[in-house]
Amino acid sequence: DIVMTQSPDSLAVSLGERATINCKSSQSVLYSSNNKNYLAWYQQKPGQPPKLLIYWASTRESGVPDRFSGSGSGTDFTLTISSLQAEDVAVYYCQQYYTTPFTFGPGTTVDIK
Amino acid sequence: QVQLVESGGGVVQPGRSLRLSCTASGFTFSSYGMHWVRQGPGKGLEWVAVIWYDGSNKYYADSVKGRFTISRDNSKNTLYLQMNNLRAEDTAVYYCARDYYDRTTYAPVGYWGQGTLVTVSS
């Protein structure tokens, strides 16, 4: 199974400042035949189901603010919130869909400093 | 719009069984792979199972393999999760979720239901 890890476990950022979350997979999730990374990011606010933010490691879902961006390839990925807003307080998860089981990272909690 | 409504959760004793259902609407159910994902109290997300859009393949997390069965009835737009030999560690909110893309097999999860709570306790 592919093991997903995230760092940090939590972070507190001032409003308007940058937040960076890292995700690492135990093996590459880059599919060579189409050069796509099978990696998604989700946001979960308290009491709500998760919401898809980013897929193919860097493609922003429709309606997601452009302050959210994803980067990385192979085994190392990053979710960046360029200018943190109050409504971004949430837990963020990465997930690989390269192979079953489609494992999630443990989550990173983002809060306001 | 896409709607996924889970039902069937509740309190069950260890070793017993429970069947969850997820009724889908707002899209062509038979064209999408479907997942179950769970979240224990205060814990992160755990992917449980997936069934291909045509039902031809099913895959499970190691933690539920041999005990849980995912199935679908495309005529009823309904996804199921049969859970047998339940354990305390199966206590969680169970989310029904849909693939982002139709007629594909490896895709991100695009839509989620609100979840149904399963509590395994004596």
Image: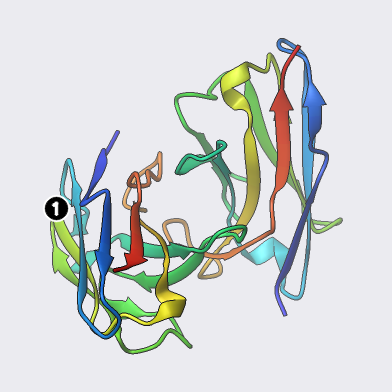
The residue closer to the viewer here, B39 or A52, is B39
Residue B54 seen in the current view:
no
Q: Amino acid at mark 1?
A: Thr
The residue closer to the viewer here, A35 or A9, is A9
Neighbor class of circle 1 (other Cα within 10 Å; few <14, some 14-19, many 20+) is some
Q: Chain of mark 1?
A: A
Numbered marks: total: 1
Name the image quarter holding the C terminus of chain B.
top right
In the rendered structure, the answer to whether residue A67 lies left or right of residue B29 reads left
| Residue at the limit of the structure toward the front, as seen here | A113
Find residue B111 and report its image quarter.
bottom right
In the rendered structure, the answer to whether residue A7 lies left or right of residue B30 reads left
Task: Quickly name the residue at label 1.
Answer: A75
Q: Is residue B105 above or below residue B116?
A: below
Q: Residue at x 66, y 30 (%)?
A: B69
| Position of residue A14 measured from the top left corner of the image (x, y, whole percent) | 26, 76
Name the image quarter holding the N terminus of chain B.
bottom right
Residue B18 seen in the current view:
yes
